Image (cartoon, grey):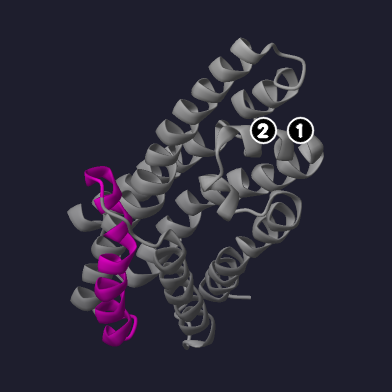
Amino acid sequence: MSFQKIVGLLVLFQSILLFLPLIILGNAINWPDSLDYPASQSLPLILNNLDEVRLGYGIYLFYSILWILIGTLIARIALDRKEIDTLFILAIALISVSALARSIGIIRWLTASPFLAEIYPTATEVSKDTIVIIQTVINNWGGAIGEILGVSLFTSGWLVAVSLIILRNNHLPRILGWIGLIVSVILSSPVIELFGMSASIFISTVSIHLWLFLTGLIILFKKPKENY
């Protein structure tokens, strides 16, 4: 099997991998809607489904770190055999920072939140109020880093860079680059939440995964070149 076909399969795998934690966490704690639940509601949910939470977010962490490899491979395929340039390096830097930000956001659900969930039921009323405040702060802070910066801002930056590489080199269909630029705008829309406005993370997430799935199919079925 050629390098290009392996990359195509990996990209397709990445595009559907998110559905696994979505199913696990959705059934356990009604994720991602539970991200907006008050701490007094989310902490008991976490405690009652702790194994599923750890499994689901563990897979989500793996998925997030895998973005470094997938993002690099897509950029390399788009670049074809040409020498690595500044735009390629920028794409790798952006997807690496994105994966780091995603991971920081996810870690809260594997460390701090389970701990708070375990001590919440036996805490005094005053302590419960404090735990709720801590959980709320951690959730808002981690969400801003993970979802807004990692999933939206830095990934959209990577997508812009990759789309420009596609348009510049013509190894992949140019339409894929133009679609990527459009998707990058949709993907970056949750950033407005930092300024008190609302946006749909669901729509932005679906848009990048549809682009990813399309890219995987194109790479997989495109006539491969040898000796990458």
Left or right of 119 on screen, residue 227 = left
The reply to whether the C-beta atoms of the residues labelled 1 and 2 are less than 8 Å apart is yes
Q: Quick check: is 58 in the magenta stretch? A: no
Figure check: 72 above or below 184: above
The one nearer the camera, 213 or 141, is 141
Residue topped by disc 2: 43
Task: Name the chief secondary structure element in magenta.
Answer: helix
Q: Quick check: is 171 in the magenta stretch? A: yes
The reply to whether residue 32 is in sight is no
Left or right of 49 on screen, residue 120 = left
Residue 196 in the image: x percent, y percent? 25, 46
The one nearer the camera, 137 or 177, is 137
Residue 197 in the image: x percent, y percent? 26, 53
The reply to whether residue 95 is in sight is yes
Q: Quadrant of residue 51?
A: top right
Q: CA distance from mark 1 to mark 2?
A: 6 Å
Query: Tag 1: residue type?
Result: Leu
The one nearer the camera, 48 or 170, is 48
Q: What residue is rendered at 56% in x and 76% in y?
A: 5
In the rendering, which numbered label is found on residue 39? none
Q: Secondary structure at mark 2?
A: helix
Q: Quadrant of the C terminus?
A: bottom left
Figure check: 83 above or below 145: below
In the rendering, which numbered label is found on residue 47? 1
Q: What residue is rendered at 41% in x and 56% in y?
A: 72
Query: Tag 2: residue type?
Result: Leu
Figure check: 157 above or below 141: below
Left or right of 165 on screen, residue 112 = right
